[in-house]
Image (spheres, rainbow, N blue to C red):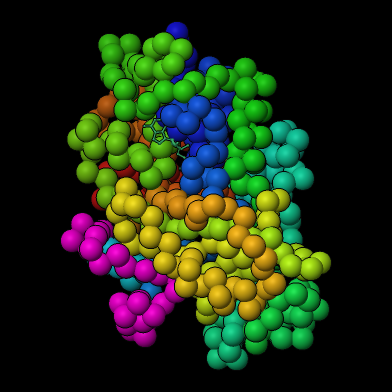
Amino acid sequence: MRADVIVLGAGMVGVGAALALQARGRDVAIIERRGEAGRETSYGNAGLIERASVDLYTFPRDIGTIARTVLGLNAAARIDWAALPQTLPWIARYFFESAPARAALHARYALPLIERCLSEHMELASAANATALIRKSGWIKAFRSERTLAAGAREARHIRDFGLTFDALDARALAALEPNVSGFAGAIVYRDPASCVDPGGLVAAYAALFARRGGRMFAGDARSLEQTPQGWSVATSAGAILAREAVVALGPWSDEIFRPLGYEIPLGVKRGYHMHYATTGNAVLGHPLLDADGGFLLAPMARGVRLTTGAEFARRDDPPSPVQLDRVEPLARKTFPLGARLDDEAWMGSRPCLPDLLPVIGPAPRHAGLWFDFGHQHHGFTLGPITGRLLAEMMTGEAPFADPAPYAADRF
Ligand SMILES: Cc1cc2nc3c(=O)[nH]c(=O)nc-3n(C[C@H](O)[C@H](O)[C@H](O)COP(=O)(O)OP(=O)(O)OC[C@H]3O[C@@H](n4cnc5c(N)ncnc54)[C@H](O)[C@@H]3O)c2cc1C
């Protein structure tokens, strides 16, 4: 079977790229080992479409946070010490790239993507009849002390330089907005972002749109990818697919393709967990709420309230160790009237991260017809559609809406 382009991986990033290529007249075949879209990292995230993330999730530089993390007292970040010999070189690069001047530069490079993330989602969501899954009500960053609240407000002011808005709430105003939430001195409400009540469902809706527009998806293992004289081929349950071009959009598993081809791209992971909860009584959570001091996030989802954890520095394939979830759950229960756990076990996913927290988007430097679109870190659900557009513009010779140089595979 033939196609113009093979897209490897059907997360938000792969489906976003497939739709953007299809919109430019390409016959696209998606290859996904699970046989359906949006079942991995793009399923389990917090669902934020982070329109206000003008800063990146850098490695903390203040000695207090570093010390608390090292001592295991920071619920937002956990180091798996047994994995440290393997993870330390990457963590060191991440620390280096998080130096304030470098981080500011990377954030500037990410800005064209952030600025267009929500409009790109809304265009797709409306074509996919899926706007009901997206709430344009912002999200809440709540603080437990006056001191952290003041620091949070100072940090938030910076977004005004970018035309973005926030509300600063004291405890009483927060109680008026979220009557079932307690324990906070106040909060910042970021008003420009949106959130999704079913992240996996949104990817599936975009994949259904891709199929309605004539796109094909096949179950197959991306690791069967081979270069041929005409381009690229991959084995699927329906036979081999041949195409002139291929896109690697395998999220945290992208190294399984680029490494055997000889690329030394420093892709690392920050693992995270989630659990769904029923609510007790008639309690309702109106917005996603990050407990900035407690190190967890509660998001109202179609399935229940989803508690997501911060970053775990561990090897991608090691067994899950949901200690962060177990640790924050008692505090989360005091924060909001959570009922029974709704999942048999904690979900685990891996945020695919480059040390500079910019994705890799563009051609594979030494392989004609091979393209990369991975490493979207904490923002892959947000950025999948817009980075798909950028990649498709590059692949079809259109003028790219942003300079792609900062995302080049050979920047390291
Ligand atoms: C706890 C947590 C919370 C998060 N919260 C947010 C948030 O609020 N907002 C946000 O924007 N981002 C968030 N993220 C990050 C976001 O989820 C990721 O950046 C994003 O999902 C990555 O998308 P992807 O398509 O690159 O990867 P994935 O969604 O993992 O897709 C990769 C696909 O490749 C497939 N695959 C892998 N190997 C093979 C193979 N050999 N053959 C065929 N197919 C294969 C997988 O099955 C998968 O479907 C969060 C992440 C975590 C862990």
Q: Residue at x 32, y 23 (%)?
A: 225
Q: Residue at x 28, y 19 (%)?
A: 227
Residue 81: say if magenta. Answer: yes
Q: Residue at x 57, y 77 (%)?
A: 331
**Magenta stretch, residue numbers:** 61-90
Between 368 and 1, the one lying in front of the other is: 1
Q: Quadrant of residue 185?
A: bottom right
Q: Is residue 249 visible?
A: yes
Q: Residue 76 at x, y = what percent?
A: 45, 71
Between 412 and 280, the one lying in front of the other is: 280
Q: Residue at x 31, y 22 (%)?
A: 224
Does 88 sit left or right of 308 as displayed?
Answer: left
- Considering the image in quadrants, where does the N terminus appear? top left
Residue 169: say if magenta. Answer: no
Q: Residue 393 at x, y = what percent?
A: 51, 32
Q: Residue 53 at x, y = what percent?
A: 55, 62
| Magenta-drawn stretch, dominant element (helix, strand or loop) | helix
Does 367 sit left or right of 334 as displayed?
Answer: left
Which residue is outermost to the top? Answer: 1
Examine the rendered structure and indicate whether residue 102 appears above or below residue 128.
below
